[in-house]
Amino acid sequence: MTLVTETTKVFLGEADIPTHWYNIVADLPTPPAPHLHPGTKEPMAPEDMTAIFPMGLIAQEGSTERWIEIPEAVQEIYRLWRPSPLHRARRLEKALGTTARIYYKYEGESPVGSHKTNSAVPQAYYNKVEGKTRLTTETGAGQWGAALAFATQVFGMSCDIFQVRNTFENKPYRSLLMRTFGATVTPSPSDTTQAGRALQERFPGTTGSLGMAISEAIELAVQDPNASYALGSVLNHVALHQTVIGQEALKQLDVFGEQMPDYLFACAGGGSNLAGIAFPFLRENLEGRASVDIVACEPAAAPSLTEGEFRYDFGDSSGTTPLLKMYTLGNDFVPDPVHAGGLRYHGMAPLVSHVYHEKMIRAVAVKQREAFEAGVLFARAEGIVPASESNHAIAGALRQARAAAEDGSSPVILIGVSGSGQLDLPAYAEFLSGDMSDT
Ligand SMILES: *Cc1c(COP(=O)(O)O)cnc(C)c1O
């Protein structure tokens, strides 16, 4: 269809912020495999998880209800930055000389610059209403830690964050952001937990990993009855919270006068932003209203979907989490320290793994130089510096847009730009000076 409007971005109003999260489980033709108890290997019962999660989130983890109402207190905080804008990337299209129409949903305008606040806020909320006063968590690049630091601060709770040592040491800005929001940040693996000490013995001189930081955060939560653990991705309830992204994008594309995208690209580390933008579109596919080609863009350094095995595995390095049925590289896999710290994870969300296994979505692996080349092109055209992680989605989309330029087709391409790269500038500097390794 030809567009008559020159519209460049659509914000929507606050009245258009979704009031419910969308649970894809209700619409899946086959049910995803349950999480298993690490000891008994039986499906997890809700009471098995109460040591680390509040009931509100445990219920969501196992829910088969299609729509789950967003509590008013959470909606009120969402209004600080939602709805997030949907842009037509007109200047990027010109720069590429493509006939594709490219749109991007930008989550970088949240208080900490990524989609992570969409889940941090409800996670803090459900813990708060069940009387918890403290949350513990892991963080890689620091996006999730910053989001949870913000969310716990909003609800007057304290927050203990274990940050992968490599990023803690090399990229101090997000840990400063976490501390600004009142959190305590410890590099992982640390000497302050049993898990941290054991991991340092097993992997001498390790630069850390998300899996290791998760083990430490869980240990701390289990020891304190007033504390819970919070996970920034992977689990069903996190994927659920992120579906505000895709629901808004559906409405915004409609305002642009588009039907459905032909392609949707999102980066995938643990899978939450991909699930968030893609599941509402996948629902359209499942109901026969669309045939969106959904593509997960993962880093070549941690290619869980494209090279991992689909089996039960632990979510952390020490084997303390429930067993999750997912694409995994093995829970002792330590990815190279690439710049997209948020993508350095050995597994993939069980729901994303399930729909990938059922061939409802595709996946591609992207090396970091191609990712940053795409990110720089995007920044120069659109004036937004994307997060290192988001660059993988942009790179995937550029492959498609360039193919369109060659064959003269005009597909509609939607990109999930999950965050801002303002605090990733040292990575850009490395790319610009030609020193970035191509892993
Ligand atoms: C954490 C993060 C990711 C990766 O996590 P997912 O759960 O796969 O979304 C991607 N982009 C940004 C900006 C992040 O902060």
Image (cartoon, rainbow, N blue to C red):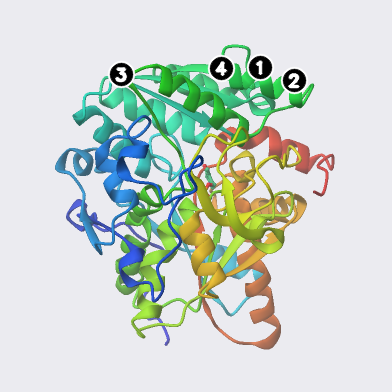
Q: Nearer the viewer, mark 4 or mark 3?
A: 3
Disc 1 element? helix
Q: Position of residue 83 (x, y in %)?
A: 30, 52
- Give the labeled residue for mark 4: 186
Q: Which residue is mark 1?
A: 197
- The mark that comes first in sequence, 3 or 2, is 2
Is disc 4 surrounded by few (<14), some (14 to 19) or many (20+) residues within 10 Å? Answer: some
CA distance for labels 3 and 2: 30 Å
32 displayed left or right of 47: right
Q: Amino acid at mark 2?
A: Glu
Residue at 42% over, 23% down: 222
Nearest the viewer among 1 and 226 is: 226
Q: Is residue 225 left or right of residue 41?
A: left
Q: Which residue type does callout 1 highlight? A: Arg
User: Which mark is on residue 117?
Assistant: none
Q: Are marks 2 and 1 in contact (CB under 8 Å)?
A: yes
The kind of secondary structure element at disc 3 is loop
- Decide which of tag 3 and tag 1 comes sooner along the chain: 1
Residue at image point 51% right, 41% down: 38
Assess disc 3: are there few (<14), some (14-19) or many (≥20) residues with their C-alpha within 10 Å of its C-alpha: some
Q: Which residue is mark 3?
A: 226
Whether residue 269 can be seen here: no
Q: How many marks?
A: 4
How packed mark 2 is, by other alpha carbons closer than 10 Å (few <14, some 14-19, many 20 or more), is few
Name the residue nearer the viewer: 46 or 84. 46
